[in-house]
């Protein structure tokens, strides 16, 4: 499978995953409000349940991987055993510690991502999360010497700064667009802009933005411990087993966050709603699984830093999807168009500059 197809799959599946999970959380909150069952402890439980479902879907990677490993000459999930068959207990323990550290990082990132979706629209979460991930991964890849193309660092840095400026323009003009669309209004007494969900947006931005920074150490450590520059033969265990252990460990960590004295399983009771379980199936089979698979295969085919272009692409295409799905509630101003043009050009330049086979 070509790198371009994997890139489009990564971006497209992320959009499906984000919008589907956002719809699930919104629908669940609506059902709780209808049934008058809202309490201060329920909303955190719902986000934990959604995050647990996210990691539970990773277990499907093991059987699904057999379909492409039998048809493709791809070493992303090499089924052959490691060259070193004798592994000491110390090495096994050290490897489990590594996977536990990776689990902690990914749990923080995904849990805060789900919490953000429960507080603010999917576009806001996409903007916040992908900006934070783009910045932290780019920074740590350069500091930890994972970046392959050292000779073009300065040029890429300038392009990245243009991309960040374009994201700033888009986020700054979004309030104006929401005002023109009727989502916000101006207080006639004070003359200030009134946003009924202002504190929810700020809370989501803080939680999701800070939590997404944990994906930086995860990406760096995963490249050093699991992929090792694409040399699958030198890995301690294959990627499928590693992902299964990470997902299982993450699932246990999340289960520990649920209250034991008054367990709440209302989220699973809501799955009888057709729209809810349909959105859940779409999120798993059209969002989460394709996203994880394409990220792993893309990381194996292209330089590690190439994955950051997916963050910029996700922001651009989420804006397009938001405009298509809500044309009557979306207004576009001139500076927002300028921001999207700058983001598109910088994304294309980085895509071409970083698009190269793994060496």
Image (cartoon, rainbow, N blue to C red):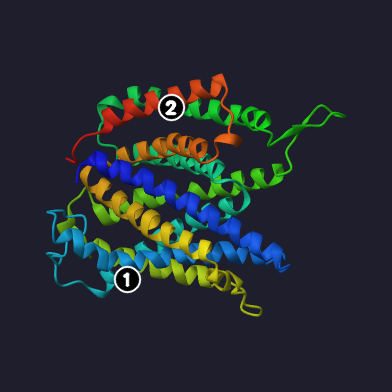
Q: Is residue 159 visible?
A: yes
State the image coordinates of residue 34 (x, y, percent, origin top left).
70, 64
Q: Pick the residue in front: 102 or 197.
A: 197
Quadrant of the image containing the C terminus: top left
Q: Earlier in the sequence, mark 2 or mark 1?
A: 1
Q: Which mark is residue 343?
A: 2
Q: Pick the residue in front: 145 or 171.
A: 171
State the image coordinates of residue 111 (x, y, percent, origin top left).
52, 58
Q: Residue furthest bottom?
A: 261
| Of marks 2 and 1, the one in the foreground | 2
User: Which residue is found at the position 26% from the left and 64% from the top?
Assistant: 64
Q: Categorize mark 1 by other alpha carbons within 10 Å: few (<14), some (14-19), many (20+).
A: few
Q: Is residue 162 visible?
A: no
User: Which residue is found at the position 59% from the left and 35% from the top?
Assistant: 328
Q: Secondary structure at mark 2?
A: helix
Per the image, the residue denoted by label 1 is 93
Say if mark 2 contacts mark 1, CB within 8 Å.
no
Q: Secondary structure at mark 1?
A: helix
Q: Categorize mark 2 by other alpha carbons within 10 Å: few (<14), some (14-19), many (20+).
A: many
Q: Residue furthest right?
A: 189
């Amino acid at each position: 499978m070509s790198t371009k197809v994997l890139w489009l799959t990564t971006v497209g599946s992320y959009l499906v995953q984000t919008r589907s999970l956002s719809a699930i959380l919104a629908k669940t909150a609506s059902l709780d409000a209808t049934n008058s069952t809202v309490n201060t402890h329920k909303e955190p439980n719902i986000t934990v349940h959604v995050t647990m479902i996210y990691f539970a879907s990773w277990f499907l990677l093991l059987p699904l991987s057999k379909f492409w490993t039998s048809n493709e000459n791809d070493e992303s999930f090499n089924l052959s055993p490691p060259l070193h068959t004798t592994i000491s207990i110390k090495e096994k323990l050290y490897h489990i510690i590594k996977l536990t550290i990776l689990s902690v990082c990914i749990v923080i990132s995904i849990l805060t991502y789900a919490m953000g979706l429960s507080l603010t629209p999917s576009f806001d979460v996409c903007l916040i999360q992908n900006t934070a991930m783009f910045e932290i991964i780019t920074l740590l890849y350069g500091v930890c010497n994972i970046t392959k193309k050292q000779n073009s660092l300065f040029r890429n840095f300038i392009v990245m700064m243009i991309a960040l400026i374009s994201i700033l323009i888009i986020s700054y003009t979004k309030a104006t667009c929401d005002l023109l669309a009727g989502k916000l209004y101006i207080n006639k007494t004070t003359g200030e802009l009134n946003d009924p969900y202002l504190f929810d947006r700020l809370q989501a931005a803080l939680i999701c933005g800070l939590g997404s920074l944990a994906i930086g150490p995860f990406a760096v450590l995963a490249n050093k411990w699991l992929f090792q520059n694409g040399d699958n033969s030198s890995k301690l265990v294959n990627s499928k087993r590693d992902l299964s252990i990470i997902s299982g460990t993450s699932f246990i960590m999340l289960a520990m966050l649920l209250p034991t004295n008054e367990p709440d399983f209302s989220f699973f009771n809501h799955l009888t709603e057709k729209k809810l379980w349909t959105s859940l199936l779409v999120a798993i089979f059209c969002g989460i699984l394709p996203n994880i698979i394409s990220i792993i295969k893309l990381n194996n085919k292209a330089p590690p830093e190439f994955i950051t272009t997916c963050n910029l692409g996700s922001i651009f295409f989420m804006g397009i999807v938001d405009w298509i799905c809500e044309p009557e509630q979306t207004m576009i101003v001139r500076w927002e168009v300028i921001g999207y043009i700058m983001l598109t050009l910088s994304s294309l330049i980085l895509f071409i500059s970083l698009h190269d086979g793994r060496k």
